[in-house]
Image (spheres, rainbow, N blue to C red):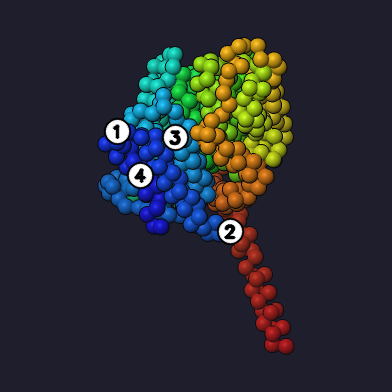
Amino acid sequence: MDYILNLIIFFPLLGAILAIAIKENLKTYAVVISSIEFGLTLLLWYNFDTTALDGFQFITAFPLIRAFGVSYLVGIDGISLFLVLLSAFISLIGFIYLNEKYETKKLIISLLCLESIMIGVFCALDVILFYVFWELSLIPMLYIIGAWGSGSRIYAAVKFFLYTFLGSMLMLVGILFLVYYYADVSGVWTFSLLEWYSLSAIPKDLQLWLFLAFFAGFAIKVPMFPFHTWLPYAHGQAPTIGSIILAAVLLKMGTYGFVRFSLPLFPDASVALLTPIAILCLIMIIYGAFVAFAQEDIKQVIAYSSISHMGVIMIGVFALNLEGISGSVFFMLSHGIISGALFMLVGMLYERRHTKMIVEFGGIAKVMPNYAAIFGIMAMASAGLPLTMGFVGEFLSLLGFFQVSHIIAAIAGISIIVGAAYMLHLYRRTFFGQVIKEENRELRDLNKRELCALLPLVAIVIWLGIYPKPILEPINKSVGNMIAIMQSRIVAQEALDFFGLMPLGEALEELQSLEPQEENLNETDTKEEGR
């Protein structure tokens, strides 16, 4: 088990290399490779010690460039564990969904490489290694959108690449400055995130600049307002499998970056910028929901709803407490499952009618009852219906921020109402009423391949909506460790007040004042024992 994490990271890449020599049955081959990969991640979860107090497990480390402190350093905690599971599971479901139209060697190889890269992002604990995986993720997705997309796919692919690449360049500046700062303070060159966590507190003014440098890379990937404009184009023109991977996993790389890097490394800046970021999140939530309501394209409804839901995730992250951050991590998983399923459902409908416009449908619940039932479950989960996976993360995220600001949390809670409105509006127009279009009378219901892809998603949405403890318990412990790191590195009084902490000097004085009392208590105990 010492090297299972390394096997999980590079096994899909090995599968992609071997796929070059495969000439037929490529989809079967991809399903087998992704099934083995998903089995390995389940084995990783089984051997993950949920009772351990240590932050990271399954750590592997060896130097790559000793002179500059660059190393191969990977490991997971309760936060990254389930994002690794999500990446492997969604990749498997995506391969099961693939039909003959997309069964090409180049697409299979691109998807397997992308799976390996995504898992590497969530496991890397060396910042340069993280950055390499982060940048490499752009290449397969650029190719998938540009080669297999529709309409203005080249424009969508280039816009996606330029936005995210520009943000990554600014993040790289912050990374390089931080490693210089660490070397100046400690005399040691290292890109180890674990070593950076132990760095003495960074001055608040410097934290603000570094926070903004990392913010550029993470906010564009989320995407936060006003950096969101690449997302509707990417979703609109990408093939279905591209939209599934993009919504389910790639967007979560941005929110994961905030949790893993921005909060623990720059706690004072996180507190200082909490209100401006919360306002941006509110704009994401409300703007995304209302624009989704106005769309006539089913895929664009789901794309803009993703912007709204990512705003709720970010609200939870910047609650800076256990409930909010744990809820946001859980919401990353639930949004990945639900949005992936919805994009898959839209793709299945597009394959039958070659249109995604709402006005082209109506009454198809009579023709496709199984499809309508699964779409309804996912639509309600997206709207945050209790007893579905979507409710748990959304509720905890808003509950966490309610402790920070009642007003902002209440406004953000409107997203549940508006979300229900646009999803019910979409569902009513698409599935209810009379079948007006003659083409819709001949639509076939879900086949076995499509049911095999969708039913596991339905089962997970309901199971974790009723009983989320197996996921929340490891997440809570890892988030608690991260909050402890944040609190140990605070320098500004504003942040101390936010967390209800006292300055280090006062804490030491209080401890010293308690020592004589403890000595007297020991003397009293000794006398009592003598008597």
Q: Earlier in the sequence, mark 2 or mark 4?
A: 4
Query: Mark 2: few, some, or many residues within 10 Å (few <14, many ≥20)?
Result: few
Please give the residue where the numbered disc 3 appears in the rendered image: 95
| Residue 344, x across and y down, in percent | 53, 28
| Residue 419, x across and y down, in percent | 67, 26
Q: Which amino acid lies under the numbered mark 3 shown in the image of this protein?
A: Phe
Q: Which amino acid lies under the numbered mark 1 shown in the image of this protein?
A: Lys
Q: Which mark is residue 23?
A: 1
Q: Which amino acid lies under the numbered mark 2 shown in the image of this protein?
A: Leu
Nearer mark to the viewer, of 1 and 3: 1
Please give the residue where the numbered disc 2 appears in the rendered image: 508
Q: Nearer the viewer, residue 244 or 28?
A: 28
Query: Mark 3: few, some, or many residues within 10 Å (few <14, many ≥20)?
Result: many
Nearer mark to the viewer, of 1 and 4: 1
Question: Tag 4's secondary structure?
Answer: helix
Q: Which mark is residue 10?
A: 4
